[in-house]
Image (spheres, coloured by chain):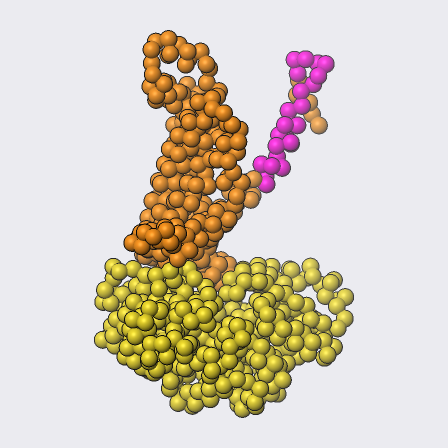
Chain colours: A orange, B yellow
Amino acid sequence: MSQTPSTSPARPRIDWLPKLVVAPSFVLGFLFIYGLILWNAYFSVSASRLLPNYEFAGIEPYINLFESDRFQVASWNLAIFATLFIGGALALGLLLAVLLDQKIRQEGVLRTIYLYPMALSFIVTGTAWKWILNPGLGIEATVRGWGFESFTFDWLVDPDKAIYCVAIAGIWQSAGFVMALFLAGLRGIDDSIIKAAQVDGASLPRIYWRILIPSLRPVFFSTIMVLSHIAIKSFDLVMALTAGGPGFATDLPATYMYSMAFTRGQINLGAASATVMLAVVAAIVVPYLYSELRSTKR
Amino acid sequence: MRKFSVKPLQAAAALALGSTMLLAHAGEVEVLHWWTSGGEAKAAKALAATMQAKGDTWKDFAVAGGGGDSAMTVLKSRVVSGNPPSAAQIKGPSLQDWAKEGVLANLDDVAKADNWDANLPKAIADGLKYKGHYIAAPVNVHRVNWLWVNPEVLKKANVKAPTTWAEFFTAAEAIKKAGLIPLAHGGQSWQDFTIFEDVALGVGGADFYKKALVQLDPATLKSAKMKEVLTTFKKVKDYTDKNAPGRDWNLATAMVIRGEAGMQLMGDWAKGEFIAAGKTPGKDFECVAAPGTSKAYTYNVDSFAMFQLKNEANIKAQKNLAGAIMSPAFQELFNLNKGSIPVRLNMNLDKFDSCAKQSSKDFVETSKAGSLVPSIAHGMAVSSAAEGAIKDVVSQYWNSEKDTPEQVMDKLVSAAKAK
């Protein structure tokens, strides 16, 4: 082991030690994240059907993928679901946080109640909402039982509206978590700013709208990051709530990929859809990440 | 087939496993199946006992989950890592897919010793062969084109069990007027497709069915007959209830049992639900062929594919297993528990109920008449890729109001091309 000359002879600096410490995680990360991404990308241009097969098949799986009605429905569903889910959870979470921030009594209890859905797995959420939204069991049957015979709420069994049910269940699950993040952000803001604004005669809504919420920008950033990855990888919620149905009306790219790769014996098509998902995520998230990180550095 | 090339990965894994394999003294069969519910589990145990009586060790490899999707995922990882089980529950064209991967064993000597060619209907024997060699042992036959009827409900509506689609709609209308649900249905794509293939077979006949849905002939898929099939199929939906989407088949059967609904189109596994509810065939419920299909038979045959193994003793045990599966004793015991009928021809059916006897009689007759057809809803007819794509089209047509039959026919033609 050669030691590099050092300015302080008493404690010789060991250059290779940090590298050595980081190396295992770097190698593992490289192998099991980027290596597997590349492996998957190769499968997407291979002739794999039932079992992995390394024969090259060109871009045919991608052509099949983009011609597939079901994949188009799945992608469009993801756009609807992600917009409603992220937007809805942000709005509801922020509203709850602002209301809880009013120094009310029993705040700890309320906070726990709102945060509780986050402790449930999406499978539980999906199953519970499947019963709540089922016209024969849940809301519709209950309201009709009260005597409102013409009341109708059958989105879950309507192929055009079922995706909104998925969004409702998703928002219910995540709004409490968003609230907790925003509440922490609000509590972190210096009191003197609010006092100064009050001295200037600003009303409370105005203080929130013009001063407090804009200063939560970093919280928005991390919340959107967390919610968008939940939206894109959503799988268990759909499986439990609708299993992709009616028909394939609530399929998302993740469920599409699973059924192609594991139940239909079309590994190359599944791999192609996974690659497309990754590319879309990269195209949206990377520029956002870049702009946010750069502006905070400045 | 021993001619199949051994993949390097498998060879390496086999070497690594060599030591454990040398230690295995007697033959061992490891069997992957998803018979984990009531009667099925009993039948699996019976097979294990038979094997143990022959001196072989039975290693159970049950993966829960009715459809077997999770079992297939486990199986794939085992095969890829070069450590396949002796046998796995695989059926229909998937057998050909697996054989093409070069991992299945040749059962010709067992089949010859027991004369499978004579003991099985030709249509079914052909499905168990790859390039003329047997690769799997069949367990049972399910008839899919059954209509389960609650006679109480029909009496209330003052109608008879329908034998044609025209009669079906008359009966359904009468039941609807009586304030009950005419047809119990579960809105999952395979159940939607079960109705579709019943309609296709009833309206179009066996030749149309084979041409359109087994050979996937584009001209037949886009014909006047197909249009009639699609229109009739869509009309059936008016007689189901709107809460059907996502419902499991056994819950739909329960609606017929409780008398909330009059009929259900479902394979003979539904019989198990009626019997478990303490009902007697012919009295509390009736089984009739789906409308217009009394002279035809859609089958769903379960089978065990045998994988290539290295160890001589295990190969011997595997052959014993294949022989035991086809033995009349096992076929009787298993099918009494499962609600299906033996796949082996010329068996004594004294212990079976009236529905099973009817099913068996029709099975033999249709096999002679050439109207024995594979069920697509149950993965018996076409490759899993084409099957999935066709199911998607049919299920979307059933569920949405957007497409006309003409558009659906175009979609069917392009779905049939999925490879």
Report if residue A193 is visible in the image: yes
Q: Which segment did they paint magenta?
A: A6-28
Q: Is residue B207 left or right of residue A116?
A: left
Question: Measured from the top left, where is residue A284 in percent x and y?
Answer: 37, 37
Q: Is residue B230 left or right of residue B72?
A: left
Foreground: B53 or A110?
A110
Foreground: B351 or B274?
B274
Residue B7 lies, with reference to residue B49, above or below; the image says above
Question: Measured from the top left, where is residue A207 in percent x and y?
Answer: 36, 18
Report if residue B4 is visible in the image: no
Residue found at x 63% / y 27%: A18
Q: Quadrant of residue A70?
A: bottom left
Question: Measured from the top left, where is residue B197 in percent x and y?
Answer: 36, 74
Q: Is residue A22 magenta?
A: yes
Quadrant containing the N terminus of chain B is bottom right
Question: Measured from the top left, where is residue B81 in percent x and y?
Answer: 60, 59
